[in-house]
Image (tube, helix red, strand yellow):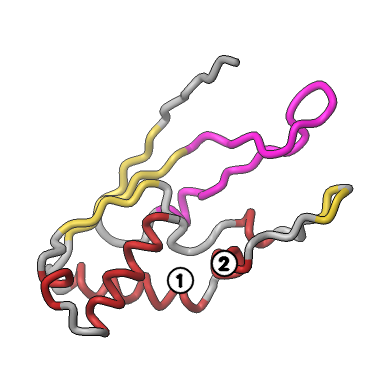
Amino acid sequence: MGGLVVKQMLHQAKTDNFDELFNNTREIVFYSCPHFGSKLADMPWRMGLVFRPAPSIGELRSGSPRLVELNDFVRHLHNKRLLEVLSFSETMVTPIVEGYGGWAFRAEIVPIESAYPGFGELVVSFIVILLFA
């Protein structure tokens, strides 16, 4: 969600006339930023137990008006050549819930269609990181 925080900060800087921050931001690099939300946030979180996600997760639902507004703001800056954008997307699924004999639930947290904001450059990474216990 860090990329969304950066978008919000830039939007707030423009709104509140923090010209130094706004005018000195020339490039942004996003890594698996859910520009258009995450399918994981769309899920009804009930799997035997009741999970209650943080209220901010609602903002990550697919098609969230706030996400659309922030993306349009950054797109406008990019189209005016005021901001360069580089986005990275992962292609690996992430194990979320462990079940008997393996992972019971795995998901792509930020699918490529959400990781690419629709402008700027996109790099798709195929990095596999192995963790040993």
Against 68, is 43 above or below? above
Q: Earlier in the sequence, mark 1 or mark 2?
A: 2
Magenta range is 91-115
Q: Is residue 130 left or right of residue 94?
A: left
Compared to 118, does 47 lie above or below?
above
Viewer-closest of 98 and 91: 98
Residue 86, image x and y in percent?
Answer: 25, 51
Residue 96 shown left or right of residue 110 in the figure: right
Q: Which amino acid type is shown beneath numbered disc 1?
A: Leu
Q: Check disc 2 and give the amino acid type.
A: Ser
Helix or strand or loop: what does disc 2 sit on? Answer: helix
At 76% from the left edge and 60% from the top edge, which residue is drawn? 44
Residue 14 position, x and y percent, is 22, 80
Give the residue at x 62% y 68%: 55
Residue 4 lies within the magenta run: no
**Quarter of the C terminus within the rendering:** top right
**Whole-percent x and y of residue 121?**
25, 51
Mark 2 neighbour class, 10 Å CA radius: few under 14, some 14 to 19, many 20 or more: few
Residue 63 image offset from top left, x and y in percent: 54, 71
* Residue 56 circle label: 2
Which residue is denoted by mark 1 in the rendering?
67
Label 1: state its secondary structure: helix
Looking at this view, name the residue that lies furthest to the top.
Answer: 132
Q: Could you tell me which residue is drawn at 42 percent across and 30 percent down?
A: 126
